[in-house]
Image (cartoon, helix red, strand yellow):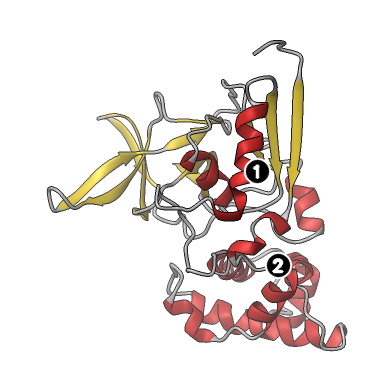
Amino acid sequence: MENNNKKISFLIGAGFSEPMGYPLGEKMNKNIKSVDISILDHILTTVEYEQAFANMQKMKRFFLKEYDGEFDYELFYDYICNTELFKKIVNPNAQKYTNEQHQVKLLYQGIVAYNIKDDQNRQFYDNTLQEGQYKDFLDVIAYLQEKYEIKFHTLNHDLFLEGLLNKRNIPYCDGFEKLNSPYYGKTYNKKIGKLIMSNLERFTNNYTTKNQLFKIHGSIDYYLYYKEDIGYIPDKIIKTKQGVDISTFERIENKDNRDKYPFCLNPYFLTGKDAKEEQYKNPILYS
């Protein structure tokens, strides 16, 4: 690199992934407005999710009435997060934020995450990904990285940009590291025919290469791990990978210090409008 002070930034929005079939806001609104209970067959759920789905639908009916039948999936998440509204519509006797409301939020995040996929129903990518119309973009990045420190700022939750960079062998870091990470999940190893423990990266806010990726609104492969203390408390954002059973997440410091958190049901990413602004204050990802 000729000059360490020479930097260039890209701001990437939803239109970048749209040619691959990823839904823009209008399609997301349509998909989620019309969702029915069969969605529970496609996302990792708890025994409380049937009731959560009923509560979500009740909230949705009030939302559509208030907004003259128009549905906005991000604005609806703010609606769900409004404790006073939730109490009024779902449980007037509740005194404060309840587990009922928490379950609806988790379910809704899972529904949004399920809809973030390309036109071949892919969410993760391997080396079979084709550059296609993105070849020129990758050519430019390959050229610029010889002279500049490149910062990719993306608002997208999907993994398509990472897939392209990996396909072209363009190195980058995203603030996650596997070295000395105590976080694991089980994945099926076809060669030996059984589940094995797979080491997972955790967010350290360490950026060690000149190409850097910032997923400002989180990602479908980010999960918030809670460690067991008096109850469960937020610990770290960890990054999963294809094939890992997210219900098997475990923190292993040593043989005498390990805990499991089997409740990582849905990715940690930011939807909503007002809810996003609140999360920007959260030091667990914005340190």
Q: How many marks?
A: 2
Decide if residue 231 is in sight here. Answer: no
Q: Is residue 65 above or below residue 258?
A: below
Query: Is residue 148 placed above or below 94 in the rendered structure?
Result: above
Which quadrant of the rendered structure holds the C terminus? top right
**Label drawn at residue 184:** none
Q: Is residue 46 left or right of residue 272?
A: left
- Is 110 displayed left or right of 67 in the figure? left
Residue at 79%, 74% (x, y): give it. 85
Estimate how packed mark 1 is, as few (under 14), some (14 to 19) or many (20 or more) residues with alpha carbons within 10 Å.
few
- Identify the amino acid type marked 1: Phe
**Position of residue 243 in the picture relative to residue 49 (left or right):** left
Q: Residue at x 82, y 57 (%)?
A: 274
Give coordinates of residue 169: x percent, y percent.
Answer: 48, 34
Mark toward the start of the polypeptide (1 vs 2): 2
Please state which of residues 244 and 66 is positioned toward the viewer in this rendering: 244
Give residue 137's mark.
1
Residue 69, horizontal then vertical, whole percent? 82, 88
User: Which quadrant holds residue 178?
Assistant: top left
User: Disc 2 marks which residue?
Assistant: 24
Question: Quarter of the image containing the N terminus?
Answer: top right
Q: Is residue 108 above or below residue 178?
A: below
Tell me the crowding category of disc 2: few under 14, some 14 to 19, or many 20 or more residues within 10 angstroms, Cα based.
few
- Label 2: which secondary element: loop
Residue 99: name its quadrant. Answer: bottom right
